[in-house]
Amino acid sequence: MVPARCELLREVREHHYVIADAGYALQPQVLKPYRGVRYHLKEWAAESGRPKTAKELYNLRHAKARNVVERVNGIPKRRFKILRVPIECEFVVANAIVFATAWLHNFIRQQNAHDLAADLSDGEDSNEGSDDDGNERWADAIEGFPFDFSLASNWRDWMAAAMWDEDNSFQC
């Protein structure tokens, strides 16, 4: 799947966003990290201290959010083999499969409360600590696509500045 042509991005509702890695094209509803700015959680763990710029703070929060999403998605993937491979069908059908497996997962959890421990202890397919899903290879090619990046770039810059201002107001 070429990220710039991903059908999912056409289906994103207004005021909803996709947390994406650097391989995706910068678009108004795609939240991707700043390139060339510290990002991976391993980098933050190795270096102590707080973010020093708005872009670092944005990237840190982006990495944490993406890590949570990947971990949450890892639990059903361990339970349902169909979610471990690309679902090659119409978007509506793929969406229904994902919702059905989520419903089944929740039903199993309600019927068997101790099941959560089994979900979290099985680290076989865990994404914990992984901030890279292989889409980096698309980054350079996508940057050349004809697209007015100014709107998406300004939106990301505004979010980073707002986070920075809010974070600094709590430090005083």
Image (cartoon, grey):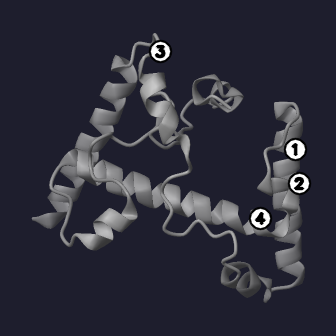
> Mark 3 or 1, which is nearer the eye?
3
* Residue denoted by label 3: 145
> Mark 3 or 4, which is nearer the eye?
3
Q: CA distance from mark 1 to mark 2?
A: 6 Å
Q: Earlier in the sequence, mark 4 or mark 2?
A: 4
Residue 148 is situated, as x and y percent measured from the top left of the image, at 40, 13
Residue type pointed to by label 1: Ala
What residue is rendered at 38% in x and 64% in y?
41
Q: CA distance from mark 3 to mark 4?
A: 35 Å
Quadrant in which the N terminus appears: top right
| Element under disc 4 | helix
Q: Earlier in the sequence, mark 3 or mark 1?
A: 1
* Residue denoted by label 4: 76
Residue type pointed to by label 4: Pro
Which residue occupies the extreme bottom position in the image? Answer: 114
Which residue occupies the extreme front position in the image? Answer: 137
Q: Is residue 98 above or below residue 47?
A: above
Residue 78 is situated, as x and y percent measured from the top left of the image, at 77, 69
Q: Quadrant of residue 104?
A: bottom right
Q: Are marks 1 and 2 in contact (CB under 8 Å)?
A: yes
Residue type pointed to by label 3: Phe
Q: Are marks 4 and 2 in contact (CB under 8 Å)?
A: no
* Residue denoted by label 1: 96
Q: Earlier in the sequence, mark 3 or mark 2?
A: 2
* Residue denoted by label 2: 100
Return the residue nearer the eye: 152 or 83. Answer: 83
- 137 left or right of 157 in image: right
